[in-house]
Image: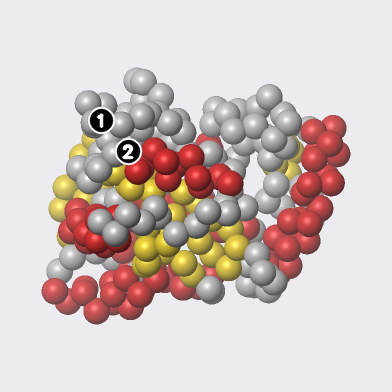
């Protein structure tokens, strides 16, 4: 399974960088890591030397990722799964009616002084794939330029244009959308995921954005997560109040 055709290049690049945190290329969207772990086929490295230095940390996840892929047909690696997860976020931000719905849910809990995010959690891989299929089936009625906050997964460098296809929810699509997407949405609080905390601090200081996450359960007690910001006006406004800060790329 290849990367989704509709996923922006900027997002794809954040998911194919070096997996070794001690590497200077780690988390650099423009630096594609060509060497792939032969076992899990998901972790990427600059070269074998970089892979050897990271093996002690990767060993545990390598087995889980390989088993998770094998137990889901073996055709999709966890790396490809994560591209699909990022693609779901991209599709969701292109449904203005549903973006409004997510912000209403978020605002409700935020009034209770809760610090959290909007999460779509899938216990089975096929449920994620079905959610994507249902959204792709919605009618496209327009296309708009898209700008993301600098430092986030969907950010494109100056001079790079990104466009977002806008989809509408017709009455006959409501039931399918609810069953395939809405049933998996929830407001979540979490203080343990290290890659998430900084993003939540940024969102707490800005009323016009929230953290959106897609989570998929893997083997055992493991899950994999993707984060980004969702904007109330669909696209980030540089004049918005609040700090500009990055959402860390890697997330286990």
Left or right of 191, for residue 218: right
Residue that extends furthest to the top in the rendered view of this protein: 159
Expressed as whole percent of the image width and height from the top left, the position of residue 184 reads 39, 71
Crowd rating for badge 1 (residues with CA inside 10 Å; few <14, some 14–19, many 20+)? few
- Quarter placement of the N terminus: bottom right
Residue drawn where x is 36% and y is 56% of the image: 114
Expressed as whole percent of the image width and height from the top left, the position of residue 36 reads 73, 44
89 to 152, vertically: above or below: below
Residue that extends furthest to the front in the rendered view of this protein: 113
Expressed as whole percent of the image width and height from the top left, the position of residue 80 reads 58, 54
Closer to us: 124 or 247: 247
Crowd rating for badge 2 (residues with CA inside 10 Å; few <14, some 14–19, many 20+)? few
Residue drawn where x is 72% and y is 37% of the image: 20
22 to 115, vertically: above or below: above
Expressed as whole percent of the image width and height from the top left, the position of residue 91 reads 33, 54
Can the viewer see residue 167? no
Left or right of 222, for residue 15: left
**Which residue is tagged 1?**
241
197 to 178, vertically: above or below: above
The CA distance from mark 2 to mark 1 is: 8 Å
Left or right of 98, for residue 152: right
Element marked by disc 1: loop
**Which residue is tagged 2?**
205
Left or right of 152, for residue 113: left
Element marked by disc 2: loop
Q: Quadrant of residue 111?
A: bottom left
Residue drawn where x is 65% and y is 65% of the image: 222
């Amino acid at each position: 399974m290849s990367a989704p055709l509709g996923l922006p290049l900027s997002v794809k690049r954040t998911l194919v960088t070096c997996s070794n945190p001690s590497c200077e290329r780690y988390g650099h969207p423009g630096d594609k890591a060509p060497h792939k772990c032969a076992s899990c086929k998901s972790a990427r490295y600059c070269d074998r030397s970089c892979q050897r230095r990271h093996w002690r940390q990767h060993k545990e996840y390598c087995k889980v990722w390989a088993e998770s892929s094998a137990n889901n047909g073996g055709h999709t690696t966890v790396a490809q799964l994560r591209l699909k997860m990022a693609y779901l976020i991209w599709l969701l931000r292109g449904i203005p009616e549903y973006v409004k719905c997510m912000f209403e849910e978020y605002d409700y809990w935020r009034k209770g002084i809760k610090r959290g995010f909007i999460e779509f959690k899938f216990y089975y891989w096929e449920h994620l794939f079905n959610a994507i299929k249902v959204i792709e089936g919605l009618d496209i009625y327009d296309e708009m330029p898209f700008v993301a906050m600098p430092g986030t997964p969907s950010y494109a460098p100056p001079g790079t244009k990104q466009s977002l296809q806008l989809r509408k929810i017709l009455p006959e699509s409501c039931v399918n959308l609810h069953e395939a997407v809405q049933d998996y949405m929830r407001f979540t609080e979490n203080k343990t995921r290290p890659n998430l905390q900084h993003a939540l601090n940024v969102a707490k200081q800005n009323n016009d954005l929230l953290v959106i996450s897609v989570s998929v359960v893997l083997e055992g007690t493991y899950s994999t997560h993707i984060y980004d910001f969702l904007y109330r006006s669909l696209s980030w406004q540089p004049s918005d109040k609040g700090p500009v800060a990055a959402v860390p790329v890697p997330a286990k």
